[in-house]
Amino acid sequence: MRVYLVQHADALPADADPARPLSPTGVRQADGAARFLASLSVRPDRIVHSGKERARHTAEIIATALGCASVEPRAGIDPNDDPAPIAEELIAATDSPMIVGHMPFFRRLANALLGTGALDPIDFDNASPLVLIRDGGRFRIEAYAKNAIIA
């Protein structure tokens, strides 16, 4: 069982557009993340996003490239949400979901899944996919790629 975490791609600033859609750079970043994940033959069972425009668009770009039909908004993965309920769900999961969301939520979720406390082993960046694999009752990092390398 794998978990794919992807922080949304670069978005326009709120003063330019309060909905914060992806910027042209963000579209390129999401395309790069999608190509990288496709090169790994990633096939998530489902893709969920926070419902925010920047996360939704990033998720849809990746879903199209991976041929994943299930893309849905999901409560509980906004930037400042508590990651504990999602971590518990992922620990018990039998499928391999992709979550497209935000910081600092992802930092806290990764720490919970990896058991690293506050060490912050991942330098999350826009559209930089993190692949975690469950090994017994714990997760470990299988792959991580910064958007600067893959975009």
Image (tube, helix red, strand yellow):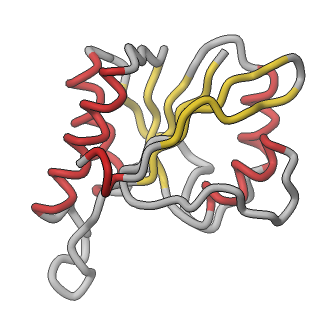
Expressed as whole percent of the image width and height from the top left, the position of residue 142 reads 62, 29
Q: Residue at x 28, y 33 (%)?
A: 34
* 101 left or right, relative to 148: right
**In the image as oriented, which residue stretches furthest toward the front?**
149
* Residue 81 point in image, percent of width and height: 66, 61
On screen, residue 39 above or below 107: above
Relative side of 115 to 95, left or right: right
Task: Check the image and name the residue furthest to the left.
Answer: 24
- Relative to residue 46, is residue 87 drawn left or right? right
Comparing 133 with 99, the one in front is 133
Check the image and report above or below for 144 versus 23: above
From the top left corner, tell me how far across and down residue 60 is, in percent. 25, 35
Q: Quadrant of the N terminus?
A: top right
Residue at the outermost bottom position: 15
Q: Residue at x 43, y 28 (%)?
A: 47
Give the tally of numbered discs. Answer: 0
Residue 65 screen position, x and y as percent: 22, 24
- Residue at 41 percent across and 52 percent down: it is 146
Quadrant of res 80: bottom right
Say above or below: 88 vs 39: below
Q: Nearer the viewer, residue 63 or 129?
A: 129
User: At x 77% / y 31%, what residue is drawn?
Assistant: 139
| Quadrant of the rendered image containing residue 121 | bottom right
In the image, residue 87 sits, relative to residue 64, either above or below, namely below
